[in-house]
Image (cartoon, grey):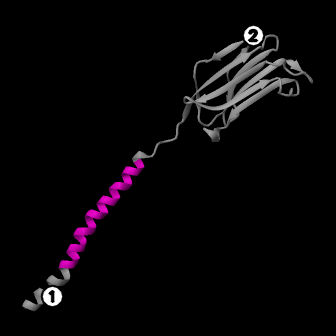
Amino acid sequence: MDLCILATMKTTYPLRSLFAILLPLTLLLSSCGDDDKKDDPKPATTHQVVVRYNGQNINGLGAAVSAGSVSPSGTATSYFSDNLATTTNISEQKPQPFTIPAGDDFSVTVSFTNVRGTQRAPAGATLYAAILVDGQVRKTVTIDNTTAPGNAYVTASAKILASEW
């Protein structure tokens, strides 16, 4: 009988030791997995957007700056449209920040509406705009005397697509 008890102890003792080591190790590893999930940042559902713009020697050129967004369903929202036609120089205008849904496209357009056909803006004339998203410059656009007229007048746009937020 002593041999029978000894044989049982030899086979159960290693199993108990293995179980005693694996149980805490399993609990430790499973708790680490939960920590990783809590640390993953969730994507933003909206962004704070500011448009900064400036221009030099733009009087009489029909300078204009506008900004807006388009939702996935095609709904357009205009945030501002500034006509700078009687301004010679404008420096670092900062309209109020806009809250833009992350699923929308956002664009800013700068134009010289009085520069038409094959005309070019005069040397030294420039209009610049920057799109800042959550405090960081993401896109810029500039028109000047090297910008070719579009179909109607000199214009250029910068756009942030929904996939680029």
From the top left corner, tell me how far across and down residue 147 is, in percent. Answer: 82, 27
Magenta stretch, main secondary structure class: helix
Quarter where residue 110 is shown: top right
Circle 1: residue type: Ala
114 relative position to 139: left or right: right
The C terminus lies in quadrant: top right
Residue bearing mark 1: 7
Residue bearing mark 2: 88
The N terminus lies in quadrant: bottom left
User: Magenta stretch?
Assistant: 13-37
138 relative position to 113: left or right: left
17 relative position to 162: left or right: left
From the top left corner, tell me how far across and down residue 144 is, in percent. Answer: 79, 23
Q: Is residue 4 above or below residue 156?
A: below
Eye-nearest disc, 1 or 2: 2
Q: Nearer the viewer, residue 68 or 74?
A: 68
Q: Nearer the viewer, residue 98 or 137?
A: 137
Q: Is residue 32 above or below residue 19?
A: above
Quarter where residue 111 is shown: top right
From the top left corner, tell me how far across and down residue 21 is, in percent. Answer: 24, 68
Mark drawn on residue 56:
none
**Residue placed at 64% from the left, 17% from the top?**
92
Residue 18 on the magenta span: yes
Residue 142 on the magenta span: no
